[in-house]
Image: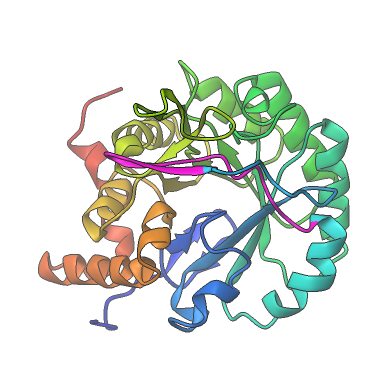
């Protein structure tokens, strides 16, 4: 890799050494990746989503491969806020990269408790507020499609947590701009765009849905064009800095998001297939910059807007 290329970027107030982060839910709490490389190779680590109380997750089977991605219905299996602080945070404090904690809830009070609990902890780079998970009953996706609820959740988190706050949006809306603006008005520092799309797979031999829950969240290459357009549109409206995610499997995918205006990218499904994917993508971005005579990452962020359509 050509380390002469400057890959530093900023996601709001978050300073990143490189633009490639892991997407929540695809790297556990980070330990899973330490067998492959030093975590400081990542621009940031977004850990598995946590809830107030421990969750066992949904019944199995809860993941299925499709022609262009994965459908999962994990159901936010996690040790809960207290378990995270006791069992996972000590390790994460030793990680030399930005660590964001994804939080999810069934109610407004859940988000308030999570933000307040994390505000007392050291070693956290920020919070990713999940208002868009399709795999939990009560809240989840329903929160993310309602601009008023997005504002209320973001505002509650902002009042409890003084650090970096990023809101993860759902692509399952006809117009994402009002939702994005609500997150900004609630005090978010950045947006993660976008979460999975609801989907399902049916076993033609048993004539029944593959997942125990019937449906789940579709990720991978199938959703990239959808999420990429949403990133482009939000950047066009200059609402908040954006972390682009959705179907990033290669460096070319990541570069498209950066050209659309994303300040950084999150790698999810690709990490499940190949743990080295974030490093491979980071290297590919540097090679692209070098090949095209760019001196630093900032030169390509949003470049497509100078030549693109006015959405």
Q: Residue at x 81, y 55 (%)?
A: 80
In-image side of 103 versus 170 (left or right)? right
Which residue is more in the foreground, 309 or 107?
107
Across and down, in percent, residue 63 comes to 49, 44
When the figure is inspected, residue 86 is found, relative to residue 50, above or below; the finding is below
When the figure is inspected, residue 297 is found, relative to residue 216, above or below; the finding is below
Which residue is more in the foreground, 291 or 219?
219
Check the picture and name the quadrant holding the N terminus. Answer: bottom left
Magenta span includes 69: yes
Across and down, in percent, residue 269 comes to 41, 52
Across and down, in percent, residue 212 comes to 57, 34
Check the picture and name the quadrant holding the C terminus. Answer: top left
Question: Which residues lie in the magenta part?
Answer: 63-79
Across and down, in percent, residue 66 comes to 33, 39
In-image side of 277 versus 195 (left or right)? left
Q: Residue at x 41, y 23 (%)?
A: 207
In-image side of 80 versus 96 (left or right)? right
Magenta span includes 130: no
When the figure is inspected, residue 220 is found, relative to residue 15, above or below; the finding is above
Which residue is more in the foreground, 299 or 78?
78
Q: Residue at x 36, y 60 (%)?
A: 273
In-image side of 175 versus 277 (left or right)? right
């Amino acid at each position: 890799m050509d380390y002469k290329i400057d890959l530093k970027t900023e996601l709001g107030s978050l300073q990143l050494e490189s633009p490639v982060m892991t997407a929540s839910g695809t790297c556990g709490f980070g330990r899973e990746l330490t067998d492959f490389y030093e975590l400081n190779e990542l621009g940031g680590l977004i850990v598995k989503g946590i809830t107030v109380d421990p969750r066992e997750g949904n019944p199995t089977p809860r993941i299925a491969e499709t022609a262009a991605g994965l459908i999962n219905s994990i159901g936010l299996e996690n040790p809960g806020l207290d378990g995270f602080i006791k069992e996972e945070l000590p390790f994460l404090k030793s990680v030399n990269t930005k660590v964001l904690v994804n939080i999810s809830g069934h109610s407004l009070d859940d988000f308030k408790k999570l933000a307040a609990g994390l505000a007392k902890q050291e070693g956290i780079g920020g919070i990713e507020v999940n208002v868009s998970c399709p795999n939990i009953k009560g809240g989840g996706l329903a929160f993310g499609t309602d601009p008023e609820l997005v504002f209320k959740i973001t505002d509650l988190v902002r009042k409890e947590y003084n650090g970096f706050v990023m809101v993860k949006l759902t692509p399952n809306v006809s117009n994402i701009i009002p939702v994005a603006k609500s997150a900004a008005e609630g005090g978010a520092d950045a947006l993660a765009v976008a979460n999975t799309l609801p989907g399902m797979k049916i076993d033609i031999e048993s004539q029944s849905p593959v997942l125990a829950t019937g449906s789940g969240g579709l990720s991978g290459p199938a959703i990239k064009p959808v999420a990429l357009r949403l990133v482009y549109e939000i950047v066009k409206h200059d609402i908040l800095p954006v972390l682009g995610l959705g179907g990033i499997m290669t460096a070319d995918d990541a570069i498209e998001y950066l050209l659309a205006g994303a300040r950084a990218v999150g790698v999810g499904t690709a990490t499940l297939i190949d743990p080295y994917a974030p490093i491979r993508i980071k290297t590919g971005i540097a090679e692209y910059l070098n090949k095209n005579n760019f001196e630093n990452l900032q030169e390509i962020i949003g470049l497509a807007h100078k030549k693109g359509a006015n959405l």
